[in-house]
Structures are given as structure tokens and as C-alpha cells.
Image: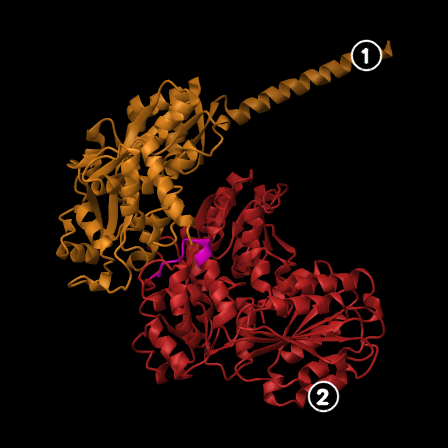
Chain colours: A red, B orange
Amino acid sequence: MRRVPLVARVALAGALALTGAGACSGGEEPLRVLAGSEVKDLEPLLKESGLNVELTYTGTLDGAEQVASGGADGRYDAIWFSSNRYLSLIDGARERLSTQTKVMVSPVVLGLKPAKAAELGWDSAPPSWSDIAAAATAGRFTFGMTNPASSNSGFSALVGVAAALSDAGDALSAEQIHAVTPQLKGFFSAQRLTSGSSGWLADAYARSPGVDGLINYESVLRGMNLTLIYPSDGVVSADYPLTLLAASPKKAEYDRLATWLRSGDVQRKIMTTTFRRPIVPGIGSEKPVLELPFPNRRSAADELIGAYLNEVRVPARARFVLDTSGSMEGERIDALRQALVTLTGADTSASGTFSRFRNRERVTMIPFNDTPRPPSAFTLPERDPEPALREIRSFAEGLRAGGGTAIFDALRTAYQEPVEPGHYTSIVLMTDGENTDGSTAADFDAFFRGLPEGQRMVPTFVVLFGDSDVEEMTAIANLTGGAVFDARTGSLAAAFKEIRGYQ
Amino acid sequence: MTRRWIGAGLALLLGAAVAAALVLGNREGSGLTVVRGVIGSEKKPFFDDPQVKAAFAKHGLQVEVDTAGSREIAGSVDLSAYAFAFPSSAPAAEKIKKDRGANVTFSPFHSPMSVATFQPIVDTLTKAGVVTGETFDIRKYLDLVAKGTRWDALPGSSYQARKRVLLTTTDIRTSNSAAMYLAMTSYVANGDDVVTSADRSAQVAEAVAPLFLDQGYSESTTEAPFEDYLAMGMGKTPMVMIYEAQYAAHLFAADGAIRPEMRLLYPSPTVLSKHTLVPFDEPATRVGRLLTEDPEFAALAARYGFRTANPQVFAGLAKNTPLTTNLVNVVEPPTYDHLEQLISLIEERYLKP
């Protein structure tokens, strides 16, 4: 089953208008909703409402920042993400929200291939998170999960695991997070796939026969051939609150949509077509799950994400193949420098902070024009990353444009770097034009197919920029199991930040 | 000559346009006086009820409401956009009355704070001595919380969760139902006495703060956790602090939301949430008076689970339900200033890392 198109366009999303056939919705302005990509699967259902609704998609964290800063006021009437919890922790955010209506529920759980679940005995007796962590530490299974800094399913899972492992029974504090970090490390040593979105994760999983399962929404996992494991000490669920912005004058339209979504028929359809649990009592028959407490301080939530990125997760090996040909001269090379500097901690927003190069990560820069330059590697230490970040910054600022465009020779160089086990390797390819020098697309195709399996598992995330050859770039993403990010109309920095969720 | 004719024609046209506008205007507004109010969210279904709207229309009124937390209504909401405020507690109304120089308030309905829970929880807490019959003993509950007790550590617990024994409430920083819970727990923590001095506040806040902070994330409106209770059951919300009216409304409507294993308990002591309307102009005063004095509104309000001035109305509906009509141990909430001080002291702790 295909879940998601290869072109991921979260930060740069276009709006989708869902104008229904209802008699009274003809000329009126639509209800503009800023939404998470998680609710995209409700589009067909929304069309049946006859209401004029326009959905614009963005990442959870980006959306939260837009709302908290007031940037969403006036541009949108409502928001619809899988959860408002992180958003509500940001200072000043609650005042910007008006009525909220929960629409449906989906817990974040572990799904394993049936044979693996049986081997571990978890198909008959549900394990606790500690049992799961012990099995993961011992290497008895592997899994994929979205990045907690860019996707709510990953964040919910991280909160759940940490809360359960801390064994405190109450809300997580920074101290408790510190105490459970070693156990978390064991747990996440079994993580083989990461992703900025649930959809791409499912695609990557389908391409990775060696991975035993996924942590994701129950609703997503139920569409796959997996045994669902509900940890005995509880989970964290998404409740999809459709929330009116306080600045919006469209209260009546919001009320109509909310009432429609909660009507019995629609709730039943949500249940049968999307596998989510209805929020209206008396419709669903799913066994209730135990819910773990969620942090009530932003500092604790951020601490948890920070600990995951810097200390817990499998460290990343990020290779950047960067076009510095003559056509990049001027604004374009400036944008590239800026985009890289953004990732060195210059962007102090939450999404900026979480997308910076992490402790324990190795970043390799491969600028190219007629030929690739020799790779420059920067390794961030376990602590005190600032000197390494400074080096990357000055490297980025020293990039100059000139010469031709040897895309495939450069990409080949990136793939020739050895792959270290126990790390998560990926490549970013940014170019603003067509291949003019060196080997061809066909040459690269043959080269790639001849690589050892470990190297072939490395995905390339391509960034469309300037006059990129869309077809050729998409072919690279398809061949390597990567994805396409479009920065032709938006900013290069935003595209780079978004890709960080996949590294 | 021609000019004059054009002028006359234009005047005729304009006259017709004005007449049309008048007719359209009348049809649109139905000739009703629009009264805008800001209210606690739990009263919204009442104001949205077509029968309530029709009852107001009979008196030439059209009441439109926005919702906000009671503390926001008393603090941050710009009240100049509204003709009345209708918070869910007497202390908040008292503050608004003082700030706005209103000379009259109406308290048309009230509702005791109560605990919505499930039979296995009742059984477990009965064994632990916290629950007797329908009574939830706040003192004994505070003792359990102070010891950091978990559900699976209670003897004979049929709720095997490693979570702490904690009542779910809304966010104390925004919501009135949590403030009412603070009113009753601060009373007990203050040696069975209403907090009336600043120097007692610090000590009491210290004692009751974990009741809120240790829950983790809490929702900002009273509907949300009750909805979780109804839809997601014991796994998420084993027991939740609500207005009795929220539970009673579903019972009276017999809509199937209250399932057989659900139970309602009354805290001892409990606090009454006195929904108090503060009018800022004459039409709003009429709204307040109608709600308080007109039996039609009292009957409608009772259907939403509220207790009204005439106890017979509620008692009639509550017959053959688990709702109790005689509340024994009811205490007064602290004054607005003292309650506010307690909340601020707890709020400070949210900011500490």
C-alpha cells in the first residue's frame, strides 16, 4: 500500500480547497484551517459535509509556532492537529485559542510483524514499556519511528516510553528525564528508521524488510499487516482537537463543521474508514487503553526532545551534496549559506533549535561544480558542540559559486563514503540546475545498483531549487528511497529544516 | 428642467433603497434586542438550546454568547465588547462587579462540585477508606496523595495502573472547576477553615500544589476532561472533578452517555459553583432577571443539570437517579483575592523547571 507521494511538501504546502456541493456554501468565504498532515486522510469525508473548508498543511511544531506567535491570526480561522498539548505549553499560545472540539482518538502503539510478536510472546501477554526496552536493548527486535521533534506520533511515543520508564507515576520533570536517559538509549538503539512524517515512515518500512515493526498511531498500523502491542503501563493518545482561533470571526462556520464532525454518522465513518476511535461515547467498541500523563511544562517537553536528539537516538551521518556552480552566483549561494548556517543553531525558534546539527552527529559537506570537492567532515562531540558548529558555519560562509554542474559525480562521491553500522546515514542533494559535467543519470543508476546493500539503504533527499530538473531529481529520490523537497517557491532554509526531521 | 427630473428620479430610487433596507433589516434581526455575553463554557449548551432561544425571543431578546474560562472573564477578557459576564463562580463575579461598578448580580443556578468515576475505582477507594457510600472524603484523599500512592499499590485494587492516585482536573491557571477544587482542598489543608489570610496562603498552596502539578498536562476547559471520561473511560480518566450539572444533564437526557459502570460521588466537603451573571446594561439585566425569576427558564436550566432557586424542580428530575438532593458538608470558597493568591502561588511552580 502506498501512503504518501514522494513529494513531501509540509513546510511549503499549498492550500487545498474542499468546496462541497451544499447549497448555501457557494459564494461564502471558506473556513481556513491550518492542519497537520495527519488529518489529510479525512479530506474525502470532509467533502461530504457540504461545508466550505480550506485545509493548509504544516508540521506540528511549525504550526504551533505560527499560532503562538500570532502569525496564524487573520490567515487562518482554525487549527487541526493531532494534539494541542505541546502548543498549549508555549507561553502565550492558549490566549490565541478559542473553543476546541475533539474529533477522534488514536493511541500511539507498537506494531510488530506477527512472527516477531509471537517470538517475543507479546501477542498473548502485553509487555510493559520496560519489557519492550529490555528486548530492544538486547537487540531482539528493531523498529521505525518518526522524529519526535517534527512529528506528533514520535513525540507521543517518546513521552510515553519516558513516563513509563521513569516509573514515577506522575508528570515528567527534567530530573526524571535525566534519570531515564540510559534506559531510553537502550530502547532507541533498536530504532532503524526515522522520518519527519508518518506517511514516509510507512513507505520506508515497506522498503526495509529487515525492520521488525513501527511505532505509530494505532490507526496507521491497523492498515498494515502487523500485530499491535498495547504496553500494559499505558500509552499517549492523539485526540485531534479542531480548534477555533480567538482572532477568527468565523465562529458560526466553525460550529457547523464541529457539530457535523461529531454527528453519529460521521463518527461511524471516521471509525470505519480511518480506524480512529470515535470521541462521541457509545459508538466505538474498542477496549479502552491506559493513558500515561503528559508533561505540563514546556521545559520538560523540550528537555525530553533535546535528550532524545543529543544523547539517546542513533547518531546521524548527514552528507550534504551542494551545488556551487556558476548559476548559484548571487542570491542563490547566499540562500544556501544561510540555510546551512540556520542548522548550526542560528535559528533560535523551537523548530530551529530542534533542527540544528546534533551532538554525536557527523556532517559531511561535498560541494561541487565541474567536479566534486573532496568531502569535508565535521564531527560534533557528545558535549559542548559549539566549536564544531562554528567550524561548519565558517565553512558554509566560505562557499563560492563558479563553474559547471557535475551532479552525478558528486552524488557518487557521497555514496562512496563508508557506511558505519549503528548510525543513521542519509544524503541531501541540493542543485539549482541540470547536470552539465561528468557522469550521467544512467551511469549513476548502474553505479547505485552495484553498491553493497548497506550503501544502497542510504536515502537521498533531493531539494528542488532554482531551475532544477524535476524529473531527474525525482528519479534520484525514487531510486534511493528518499523524498523530494521543493524550495523553488519557499525558502531553502525551511526545506533544509524540514529534511532534518528525516535525518 | 432635465436636471430636476433626474434629481427627483434619484430621490425616488434612494427612497426605495432605504425602504428595502428597512424591510431586510427587520427580517434579519427579527426585531429582537441582541444581548452579547461572555460565559463559562459549561453553560453554552444551555444558551445554544433552541427552546432557550425561543424563550428569550418571547421577551424580545436574542442572547449571543462567547465562552471563556471564569478566571479569564474576571481577568483578561475585554468586557467592553459584552453586555454581561456570566462566570461559573461567585468569587469571579464579585471581582467583575467591583471592577465594572455593576450594582446588581443574579445567581440563577448553581451546581455542587462532584467526582465522576467508575465502579472499580469506587470499590478500591472504599477499601482504602476514601469513599463511603456516595461520599468522597477529601481529607483521606489528601493523605493518600501526600504519600504518592499509586493505584496498583492500593490493597485489593481492581484498577491495575502504575499511575498515581490523582483526581483529574482542568488547568488551575484558566479554569473555574479547578479553582473550585482548590477551594475545597485548601479548606481541608487549612485545618477545616476557609483561607482568609495571605500568610496562610503560602503554606496551604505548598500542600495542595501537587494535586495539580503532578497530574501533568491538564485541559483548559471543563468539557474536555469530562469528555475524555465519557469517551475514553477509566484508562485515561479514572476520576474527574466536574460540576454535578455535567453528569446530571446526560442522566436527565437519557442519552446513553452515562454507562452502567459510571458513578458520581460528592466530595466532603464540597463547594457550590454559583453561576453568577453580572449585567452591564439594561437588556442584560432583563436577561439576568428572566433566568432567575421566570419558571420557564428554571425548568430549562434544570434539564441541563443545574440546581435552581426552587429546589423542587431539580428534585423532581433527580428522582430515581443516583443524584443526591441534600448536600451535607458544603463550604464557602475563599474570597476572590485569596483564591487568586493561592492560584498565583501554584502558577509560579509551573514556571520552575
Along the line of sight, the residue nearer the viewer: A98 or B260: A98
**Residues at marks 1 and 2, CA–CA distance in whole angstroms:** 88 Å
Q: Within the image, what quadrant is residue B243 found in?
A: top left
Dot 1: few (<14), some (14–19), or many (≥20) neighbours within 10 Å? few
Residue to which mark 2 is pinned: A446
Helix, strand or loop at label 1? It is: helix
Count of numbered labels shown in the rendering? 2
Dot 2: few (<14), some (14–19), or many (≥20) neighbours within 10 Å? few
State whether residue B141 is above or below residue A124. above
**Amino acid on which disc 2 is placed:** Ala
Q: Position of residue B173 (x, y in %)?
A: 39, 43
Helix, strand or loop at label 2? It is: helix
Identify the disc placed on residue B5. Answer: 1
Secondary structure of the magenta portion, mostly? loop
**Amino acid on which disc 1 is placed:** Trp
Magenta segment: does it hold A297?
A: yes
State whether residue A91 is above or below residue A348. above
